[in-house]
Image (cartoon, rainbow, N blue to C red):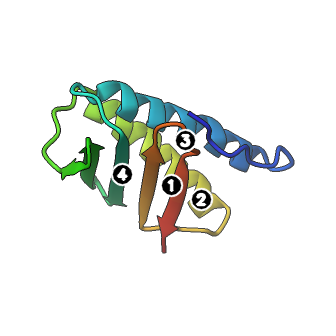
């Protein structure tokens, strides 16, 4: 797993890198049936989180992959990540992470 390193000049952005690693590790470790690629999307609102995990294995995509991770921990990490962005004046509405084995994790924010 390779996640781009944020510049260390901004401690909030550096903290985002740590949070993103924790988020990705939690999601990846929770995929119980293995995968070749994954896409995770989460929208955070006041007191709720709407998420979707898409897993690709042997060329087939599935949105009902079995997963075993602590949703409360994931919510806390995502909420902290979003608060950092809000504090910097970058209030995103949703985050999208994608990863294919052997490649770099891609992160996109929806504003």
At x 35% / y 50%, what residue is drawn? Answer: 40
Label 3 and label 4: CA atoms lie apart by: 14 Å
SS type, badge 2: helix
Residue hosting label 3: 20
Q: CA distance from mark 4 to mark 2?
A: 21 Å
Closer to the observer: label 1 or label 4?
Answer: 4
Say the numbered circle drawn on residue 39. Answer: 4
Q: Circle 1: is it few (<14), some (14-19), or many (20+) Cα within 10 Å? A: many
Circle 2 crowding by C-alpha within 10 Å: few under 14, some 14–19, many from 20: some
Circles 1 and 2: CB atoms closer than 8 Å:
yes
The answer to whether marks 3 and 2 mark residues whose Cβ atoms lie closer than 8 Å is: no
Pointer 1 or 4: first along the chain: 4
Q: Which mark is residue 85?
A: 2
Residue closest to the far left: 64
Q: Please, what secondary structure does the residue beneath circle 4 have?
A: strand
Query: Which residue is tagged 1?
Result: 82
Which residue is at a point 74% across and 48% down the rendered structure image? 6
Callout in the foreground (3, 1)? 3
> Which residue is at a point 44% across and 59% down the rendered structure image?
95
Label located before the other in sequence (4 or 2): 4
């Amino acid at each position: 797993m390779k996640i781009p390193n944020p510049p260390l000049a901004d401690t909030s952005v550096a903290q985002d890198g740590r949070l993103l690693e924790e988020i990705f590790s939690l999601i990846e470790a929770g995929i119980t049936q293995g995968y070749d690629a994954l896409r995770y999307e989460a929208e955070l609102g006041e007191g709720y989180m709407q998420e979707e995990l898409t897993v690709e294995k042997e060329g087939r995509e599935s949105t009902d992959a079995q997963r075993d991770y602590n949703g409360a921990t994931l919510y806390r990490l995502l909420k902290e990540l979003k608060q950092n962005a809000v504090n910097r004046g970058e209030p995103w509405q949703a985050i999208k992470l994608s990863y294919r084995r052997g490649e770099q994790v891609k992160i996109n924010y929806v504003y």
